[in-house]
Image (cartoon, rainbow, N blue to C red):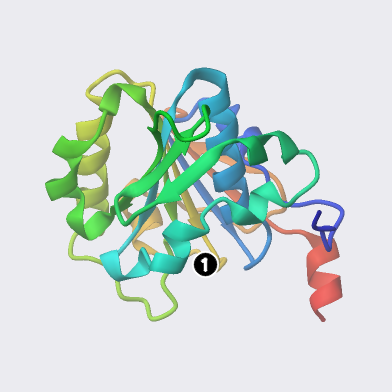
Amino acid sequence: IIILMFNSYFSSDFILSKGALTNIVFSDRSDGKTFDCKSKALLDYERDKSITIYMRRFKTEITQKMYETFFDEVLNVEGYERFRKWGFKGTRTGVQVSLDFGKTWDWIIYFVPLSMGAKLKSQLNVLRINTIRYDEVIPLDDKYLPKECVQLMEFYKSIDRDRETTQLVLTGNRITLFNPFFDFWGIRLQITKEQIKMYKDDTVAVQIYVNDEHRLKRQ
């Protein structure tokens, strides 16, 4: 069992409860955003066999270490022990899960590099996808894809197919007000703690997550 360093971490429950289809979260690194993505994928599959899309920008970001150990950090945390009974096998395509000791396998995670989204979308079981989680959306080198937001929304529409039930979650490790996502949706805001701002007739939600406990210990 891993003992967590801090008393609290980021959870997407709060922002997703607002019901927006597009959700943008910026915070410091190591505040728990990727852990939240993985743990919610387990809980969503347990609830209704939902498949989560885990998105990064380029295919080089989907490494062998990532897909072979995707859920390990969650399985070793108190409260998620029951998921250790599940079997997992990862490939560059995604992670499959078995609930019957390897007799049958089912998708729980699809890995989708946005740069390849147009090619991969036809291979996905879209009716079982309720959440797309685009992680590390603010690159350290500031290198985005050409017309990145247009590509992202075209991919989103190919998954949601006018159902308006798929929630897109963008998470970034740099708190910056200057990025193509804010420009695309016309977002202007001040950095505030924990407060969620709604835009575009409540279809876009933005959260700047700041954890004072984390920042104090990192000093």
Location of residue 160 by image quarter: top left
The x and y percentages for residue 13 are 64, 34
Q: Residue at x 66, y 49 (%)?
A: 74
Please state the total of marks drawn on the protein image: 1
With 207 as the anchor, is 134 left or right in this view? left
Instruction: Let me know if residue 43 appears in the view.
Output: yes
The x and y percentages for residue 57 are 31, 62
With 101 as the anchor, is 89 left or right in this view? left
Image quadrant containing the C terminus = bottom right
Toward the viewer: 47 or 192? 47
Q: Residue at x 52, y 33 (%)?
A: 101
Q: Is residue 46 above or below residue 177?
A: above
The type of residue carrying mark 1 is Thr
The x and y percentages for residue 158 are 20, 33
Q: Secondary structure at mark 1?
A: loop
Q: Is residue 40 above or below residue 187?
A: above
Instruction: Let me know if residue 21 appears in the view.
Output: no
Q: Residues within 10 Å of mark 1 (few under 14, many from 20)?
A: few
Image quadrant containing the N terminus = bottom right
The x and y percentages for residue 218 are 79, 77
Toward the viewer: 193 or 52? 52
Toward the viewer: 104 or 132? 104
Q: Residue at x 30, y 21 (%)?
A: 127
Q: Which residue is mark 1?
A: 176
With 149 as the anchor, is 50 left or right in this view? right
